[in-house]
Image (cartoon, rainbow, N blue to C red):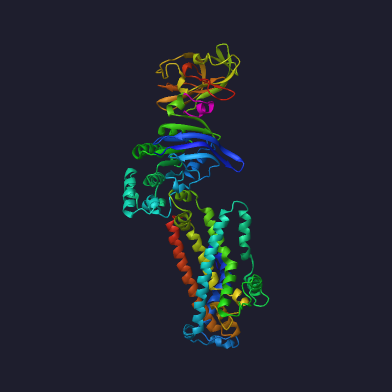
Amino acid sequence: MATVSLKKLVKRYGTVEVVHGIDLDVRDREFVALVGPSGCGKSTTLRMIAGLEDISDGALEIGGKVVNDLPPRARNISMVFQSYALYPHMTVRENMGFSLKIAKRPQKEIDERVEAAADILELKPLLERRPSQLSGGQRQRVAMGRAIVRQPEVFLFDEPLSNLDAKLRTQMRTEIKKLHSKVQSTIIYVTHDQVEAMTLSDRIVIMRDGHIEQVGMPDEVFRFPATRFVAGFIGSPPMNLDEAVVDDGKLVFASGDSLPLPAQFHERVTVGQKVVFGLRPDDIYPTGHGLSSADTTDIHQLDLPVSITEPLGNETLVFVGFNKRDWVSRMLNPKPLAAGEKIAMSLDLSQAHLFSAETGRTLRG
Amino acid sequence: MKLRLPAPILLLLPAIIVLVAVIVLPLLLSFYSSFTPFRLTRPETLWTFIGLRNYINVLSNWDFWVAFGRTILLLTIALNAEMFLGLGLAMLVNKATHGQRLLRTLMMFPMMFSPVLVGFQFKFMFNDNIGLVNNALQSLGLTDQAIPWLINGNLALFSIIVAEVWSSTSVFAILILAGLLAMPQEPVEAARVDGCTPWQTFRYVTWPFIMPFAFIAMTIRSLDVARAYDIVKIMTDGGPAGRTELLWTLVGRTAYSDARMGVANAMAYVSIVLSILFTVYFFRKLAAARQQIGAEW
């Protein structure tokens, strides 16, 4: 059993607190992604789990045992680093077998386990090379191989794909997903890329400024963001967010533009309350060019001027002017549009979000 | 007719003239004189060619081989001691979280002193009557004798080694520290996660990385020590009874005290072979170590 529990985990550097008592339970064999902008404390948290950073306060349990004061080598973990961190003076084979050699395993066992890992990662032809003779993607695979050879209880990934180019990143993402289904270990994966987090993980932990903003399944954090921050962070292109004031049955924006108050929030807001209105690009589209598969829809029609378009082939991102800002909308089956042209837009208000302008928390309840 | 030299040669000419005048000519002259019985007191001997006789004399001269052996002994002990101390110092300074810059500067102080001054300083410290070392040992009650540091043959060589090590450990420390600072931290962290104890981390990850830096220091210092002269000259002048005579003090004595310039030059050329051998050896090691860590410099 390799559960990982963070209990009120705190990290301080001198007097500066960077991780503020976070709680998190990672289940056995679960793939959890820590995601957030840089400086949010996700890497620090991972390094505390690895034992590379001291824990200032709180408790860390791996497999039900408090490991706060254990050195990394006693925690039965493997870590894959952003910069691969291969040993430059060792061949791929030696790199992968190093931890077993240190653990004084018999040579035969080392060979078998290295070969097995090399098989999984298709590294067989590269075993006798040195890291300097490998490409970035190959190095990353070796780093993963080194991690799986140990057969640890927990894998830690620290932005493993950030140094790869876009194409390779997509490819390695698939590899990591396959790897997880093969090795069946608990994985904690740090990334700043929400797409990676969404595609790979069973659960996502969104962090900001040393706090956890929301924990949930990818679909959950996408559809029901708990805070304004999560709403803006998860999803690409990001959710349109704008401040408004609740009036009688409608939302009035700063420029005077207004929208009807979405029905699902009627009971949850009071007149005069300051809120943040959020609508995903998928839920605002040129009429006739959108997703209309949602079970319940509450379409509001509006004529808005086009400012710019970003054609992506199968769809076009259309930026339309609303409340003196550009709102991004996703246009399926695109047709050419001219800048300045006024077009009919459909806003599916049943999918709209409202957050408290004060606390940033969702008003969905 | 005007002589027209190509521009590159013309531009390099000042440098070439200076180099020829101060390096090539003296080198050729000294090499030539090693084939003559040239004595400073009898200038006309410079024109007597005696073939390899000087070399035969030198190579069959027991004193020369003793000095040769002693130089290698000094080199081995001093370089190893400097290596270990320098490594230790570099690791400690690398650990320092505050005032690392100050420590680095302090560490270089011994290198700023002229070797002659270092010689005088240690000659004073190791003096058997008024020296600091004996004073300290006696005050601490470790001995009630006046230990004859510079008078006993073995102790004298030891004292010279101490002076050498004191003045030059920082060469190792600085270069190894440079290696440590340039070293990426991730492999070290990977090693810790991979199950290494601090010692194993050093042995398998840190050391291979800083080895090239250590070899550079070794090369520099082996050349330095192989031509050791000033500290020895001041501290013991090869004494007592030739027990600290090194290659270059012997060469110097033969050339100037005995005025046998021809023989001295022959000795010098044999000695240079020693330095070349050490340089080749360490550069090979360096190249191998660099290749091993896949260094890109």
Residue situated in front as seen by the camera: A76 or A353: A76
Whether residue B98 is visible here, answered yes or no, is: yes
Residue situated in front as seen by the camera: B257 or B178: B178
In the displayed structure, does residue A51 sit left or right of residue B164? left
Q: Which residues are magenta?
A: A224-235
**Residue at horizontal 56 percent and vertical 74 percent from the top:** B158
**Residue at horizontal 51 percent and vertical 15 percent from the top:** A262
Snapshot quadrant of residue A251? top right
Name the residue at the top extreme. Answer: A248
A132 versus B62 height, above or below? above
Whether residue B11 is visible here, answered yes or no, is: no
Quarter of the image for the N terminus of chain A: give it: top left
Taking the magenta stretch, the answer to whether it contains residue B161 is: no
At which x and y percent is residue A269?
56, 16
At which x and y percent is residue A349?
48, 16
A117 versus A244 height, above or below? below
Residue situated in front as seen by the camera: A136 or A39: A39
At which x and y percent is residue A199?
41, 32
At which x and y percent is residue A252?
58, 16
Snapshot quadrant of residue B4? bottom right
Taking the magenta stretch, the answer to whether it contains residue A229 is: yes
